[in-house]
Amino acid sequence: MRVINTMQINKIEASEVQGFIKDIIKAYKKFGSTRIENKIKELYNTTDGNHHNLIKQKIFDEISTVYGVSEKVIKQSNKRGNVTQAKVTAMILLHKHIKISHSDIAKIFKRGQSLVSRKIRLFNNLNLKNIDIADVKLYYNEDFIINFELINKKIVTFKQAITNN
């Protein structure tokens, strides 16, 4: 049986840290600071700690089930109809449940930040009278509201289950 003393452990930890730092420097040179910063934010930008990715995946899974479209199709930028409703539902739920910024949501869906901001703002202000006809069709569509409420309840239940463990 091999005995490892504290000094050996510190050397191992130091070499791992040095390797990690070298990897960060290589990534910085290859990708730039903005992409690295965005990736770090993506990993840690959540009030639910390590559950961020689980909740994000659950949102897409539930939307895929309800609307009958895959996550890949939801993220495509050139789709219409039912897919648009699924996409808007995902935008709103991602912002609501894991506090992803509008610009990060825009990147996920390959859309402009202003479009994402507008969709989320209009949904949050449904009682306002100055919504254009396209938004009226989407937000006052009974199916959209019913589907949103159904998916939202499932996400809330899922969040409670994983945060209680």
Image (spheres, rainbow, N blue to C red):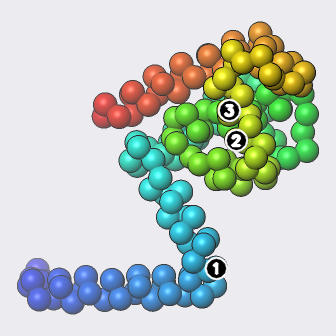
Which is more foreground, mark 1 or mark 2? 2
Please state if 132 lies on the left or on the right of 37 as rendered: right
Identify which residue is drawn at 54% across, 22% down.
Answer: 154
Q: How packed is label 2: few (under 14 Cα within 10 Å), some, or many (20 or more)?
A: some
Element on which disc 3 rests: helix
Task: Kindly identify the amino acid type of the residue bearing the numbered disc 2.
Answer: Ser
Relative to 142, residue 110 above or below: below
Element on which disc 1 rests: helix
Number of numbered tags placed on the structure image:
3
Label 3 and label 2: CA atoms lie apart by 6 Å
Whichever of callouts 1 and 3 sits on the residue coming sooner in the sequence is: 1
Find residue 117 and name its label. 2
Label 1 and label 2: CA atoms lie apart by 27 Å
- CB-based contact (under 8 Å), mark 3 and mark 2: yes
Which part of the image, by quadrant, shows the N terminus?
Answer: bottom left
Q: Which residue is mark 1?
A: 31
Q: How packed is label 3: few (under 14 Cα within 10 Å), some, or many (20 or more)?
A: few
Identify which residue is drawn at 73% across, 42% down.
Answer: 116
Horizontal and vertical percent position of residue 6:
9, 83
Q: How packed is label 1: few (under 14 Cα within 10 Å), some, or many (20 or more)?
A: few
Q: Is residue 68 visible?
A: no
